[in-house]
Image (cartoon, rainbow, N blue to C red):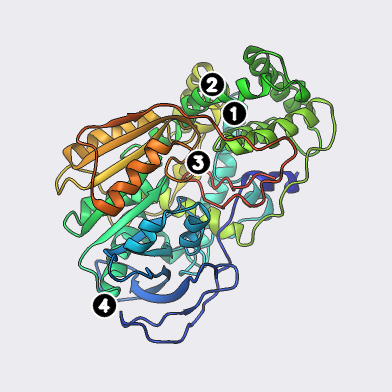
Amino acid sequence: MRRALTIVVAAATAAVMFAPPGLAQTGLEWGDCPADVAKHGLRCTTIEVPLDYRDPDGQRIRLAVSRLASKNPDKRRGVLLTNPGGPGGSGLDFPGGLVDLKLPQSVLDSYDIIGFDPRGVGRSTPVTCDLTTEQQYRGNIPPYARNAADVLTQARNAKTVAGQCAESKTANLLPHVSTAATARDMDRIREALHEDKLSFLGYSYGTHLGAVYTTLFPDRGDRIVLDSNLAPGGLDRTGSRLFGPGMEKRFPDFAKFAAARPEYDLGTTPEAVTAKYFDLAARLDKTPVQGYDGNLFRLATFGSLYRDSRMPALAEIWKALDTNQPPPPAAEAQPNLENAVAGHLYVICNDSRWPKSVGSYLHDVAVDRKHYPMFGASGANIRPCAFWRSEPAEPPVRVGDQGPSNVLLAQNTRDPATPQAGAAQMRRALGDRARMVTADQGGHGAYLIGANKCANDTVTAFLTTGERPQDDRVCAAEPARHPPVGASHSSEPVTYDAVSLVPSPLP
C-alpha cells in the first residue's frame, strides 16, 4: 500500500544547510548548490528574514535561494522569481526544471532566473507535524468519502494531525508560515538581489502567491505571470471543492484516449471507459488489488490527468487492476515527504478560515458526491485545518485590482486541479491589472508544460518584450502529446502541483 501511494505524492528536498563560498556582485555569497539541485549552472545561497514581520528585529529564519544567471548582459532586464506550486513543494531546483521544460533562450537572456524554498520548506527553515509514515502517505488531499462514516473517520484523523502540528518542535512557527509571509520574503529576496523590481512566474499555488505579492507590493512587480490559477482565496474551502468539477471536465479527455486504444481493453467508447472508472472504484472499495483501494485509485486517476503524457501509464494501471495483475512499479518516495505535507498544512490552514463544524463537511460531501461523483467527495472532505489550534500572525490578504496593469494569467480550459472557473474569479479580482490567455487544452500547467504554441508564445512575448494581449485571448486547441505505449516518462521534468503535491513523472 505504501509503495503504491508513492505514485501520487511528491516531497520537498531534505532540510540541510549549505554555506556556499564566493562573493557575487549582489553582495550575496553564491556557490555550489546541493547535488540534487545542481544543474544547468545553477548557483545557491541563503538569506535571513524575520520570522515575524511585525517584529523585524526579532527572531530570524533562513531562506534557501538559487540563481540561474543570464549570460547576455546586453539583454538582461532583471530577475524572474519563480514558484512551481505547492504549498509544501521545494522551488530551489525549479530554474533548472524550467530549462528542462525548454524555457526559451530569449527568456534566459532577459533574466536571472531565481528559485527558492519558501519558508517552512526544504532547505529553508523547515516545519514538521511529526507525521507517522502512514499519515505522510495519506498525502494532501482528503480521501474520497463514500458515506457519512468515512467523513467521521477522516475527521478523527484530521484532528489528530492538527494536534501533532500544534505540539511539534516547530509549533512556534505555526502562526508565521503563510502566503502573506512568503510574499514578504519574496520582497526581501528582491532587496537582497539589489533589484528595484522583480518579475514573477508562478504555477498553480504559485498563482496565489504571485497575486498576493502584487497586491501587497504593486509597484515592486515588473512582469507577473500566473499559470494554472487558483481562485483569489487560494486553496481555501471553495478552492478545494473545485477538484470535483475539475475532474469531471478533464476526465473525458482520458476516456477518449483509452477508448481509441483497444490494447488497454478498458472500453470501446468514452462512455464505456467512464463506466469502467466507477466499476473499478467500487470493486477496489470492497477488495483492494496490489495495494490499491478505491481511494488510491481515484487519487491516482486525478493526479494522472495533470498531463496528457501520463495517460498511457494510467491506462496500464487501470488494465492491471481490472485483471488483478500487479500495476507498473511505483517510483520510490522522495525524501522529506513529512516536511512537504506539514508545510502544505501550515500554509493552507493560515491562509483562510475553515469551517469548524463537522456537520458542514458532512453536508458538503453529500452534495458534491451527488453532483461530481468522480472526485467531489474528496475535495469536499474535512482537513486538519478544521481543528487548527493557532491563528495566523497576519490576516489573509485579499487579492485586489489596485496597481499597474502588468499581470498575465495563463490557463487551460480543462485543468483538473485549478479549473477555469477559479481562474475566471482570479481574473475578475485583479480587474484591469490583468489579461488572460486561455488554451483550449486539458491538463495542469499551460506555459511550457502544455503543447499550445499560441499560449506559449503569448507568455514568452510578455516576459521578453512586455507585449500583452489588448484583451483576453483564447487559443484554439492543438494536438495533445501522448508518448507511445510502454515509453518511459522518467525524463519528464518534475514540477509540483499547487494543491496535491502530485509528482511528475508518474511511473
Q: Is residue 102 left or right of residue 209?
A: right
Numbered-mark total? 4
Q: Which mark is residue 383?
A: 3
Q: CB of mark 4 within 8 Å of CB of mark 3?
A: no
How far apart in space, not on screen, are marks 1 and 3 (Cα)?
12 Å
| Distance from the alpha carbon under mark 4 to that under mark 3 | 35 Å
Amino acid at pointer 4: Asp
Mark 1 belongs to which amino acid? Ala
Task: Residue type at mark 3: give it.
Answer: Arg
Q: Which residue is mark 4?
A: 57
Among numbered discs 2 and 1, the one appearing first in the sequence: 1
Residue 369 - label: 2
Left or right for 203, reference 15? left
Instruction: Determine whether the residue tagged by mark 3 lies in a helix, strand or loop.
Output: loop
Relative to 158, is 60 above or below? below
**Residue 396 seen:** no
Q: Earlier in the sequence, mark 1 or mark 4?
A: 4
Distance between the Cα atoms at labels 3 and 2?
A: 17 Å
